[in-house]
Image: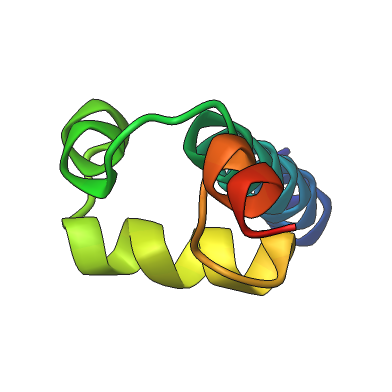
């Protein structure tokens, strides 16, 4: 007999980890200079969602080069 509670909890945990990993990669791609449209296309989300993720994780939406140029 399947223990649905444990099975669903394991899968929910794995999904949350995968989403967190995806978000980290979205933020890193932006820091490396990739456009939000590219990132969105690659991640299967729209560019505004990519911008929101990058801003949440990186503190703003600029690339590493844009940050260094502003300093």
Instruction: Identify the image quadrant of the C terminus.
Output: bottom right
Residue 7 drawn at (x, y percent): 73, 45
Foreground of the two, 26 or 13: 26
Foreground of the two, 62 or 30: 62
Residue 17 drawn at (x, y percent): 74, 44
Instruction: Identify the image quadrant of the N terminus.
Output: top right
Residue 63 drawn at (x, y percent): 53, 44
Q: Residue at x 23, y 51 (%)?
A: 45
Q: Left or right: 66 with respect to 13?
A: left
Foreground of the two, 42 or 11: 42
Q: Left or right: 33 with respect to 65?
A: left
Q: Residue at x 32, y 66 (%)?
A: 49
Q: Residue at x 68, y 53 (%)?
A: 16
Residue 2 drawn at (x, y percent): 71, 41
- Vertical placement of residue 19 versus 49, above or below: above
Q: Left or right: 22 with respect to 49?
A: right
Name the image quarter holding residue 8. bottom right
- Vertical placement of residue 7 versus 5, above or below: above
């Amino acid at each position: 007999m399947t223990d649905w509670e444990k099975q669903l909890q394991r899968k929910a945990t794995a999904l949350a980890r995968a989403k967190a990993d995806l978000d980290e990669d979205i933020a890193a791609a932006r820091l490396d200079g990739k456009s939000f449209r590219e990132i969105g296309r690659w991640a299967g989300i729209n560019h505004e969602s990519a911008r929101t993720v990058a801003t949440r994780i990186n503190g703003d939406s600029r690339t590493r080069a844009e940050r260094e140029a502003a300093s």
